[in-house]
Image: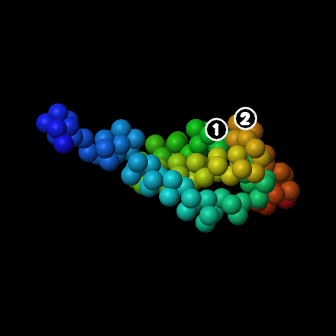
Amino acid sequence: MSDITNKFKINTEKVIEKVYHISELHKIMEDVIIDFVNQVVLMSDDELRYDRDDWMARFGRDIDKEYEIEKNYIYESDIHSLAIFVEQLRRFGEIQYGRKRKLEENKLPKTSDNG
């Protein structure tokens, strides 16, 4: 090798990791796959036909703030959201934005108000 080649020798694996964060990305994708296999793929169409993004904005993050839930819970709920988005895309061909989860009266828990 010439002096110039030695002078500018670059550890490409280190550069790739620094730029693309492959190890972190791999861990996140692995966690999404685990959640997908263990939970999301088993959900019915009805359970998946809702705007998860809206639901998390309205309820998921409010709970996190109100109870100051540990950071791991936030990570796990975000991983679950990503797995849901993947399954919605696979199953329906699109992520279900703008779809509110509908509650059917006959599926509500029985109370003194509704019989």
Residue holding disc 2 = 98
Left or right side of 40 for 16:
left
Residue closer to the observer: 12 or 96? 12
Residue 110 sits in which quadrant?
A: bottom right
Residue holding disc 1 = 54
Taking the spot 78% from the left edge, 54% from the top edge, the residue there is 45
- Residue 113's spot in the image, x, y percent? 80, 53
- Residue 78's spot in the image, x, y percent? 52, 48
- Residue 80's spot in the image, x, y percent? 57, 53
Residue closer to the observer: 113 or 22? 22
Tell me the kind of residue under disc 1: Asp
Left or right side of 41 for 70:
left
Q: CA distance from mark 2 to mark 1?
A: 8 Å
Q: Are marks 2 and 1 in contact (CB under 8 Å)?
A: yes
Total label count?
2
Residue closer to the observer: 62 or 37? 37
Tell me the kind of residue under disc 2: Gly
- Few, some or many C-alpha atoms within 10 Å of disc 1 (few <14, some 14-19, many ≥20)? some
Taking the spot 68% from the left edge, 60% from the top edge, the residue there is 41
Left or right side of 40 for 14:
left
Taking the spot 72% from the left edge, 60% from the top edge, the residue there is 43
Q: Quadrant of the N terminus?
A: top left
Mark toward the start of the polypeptide (2 vs 1): 1
Residue 109 is tagged as none
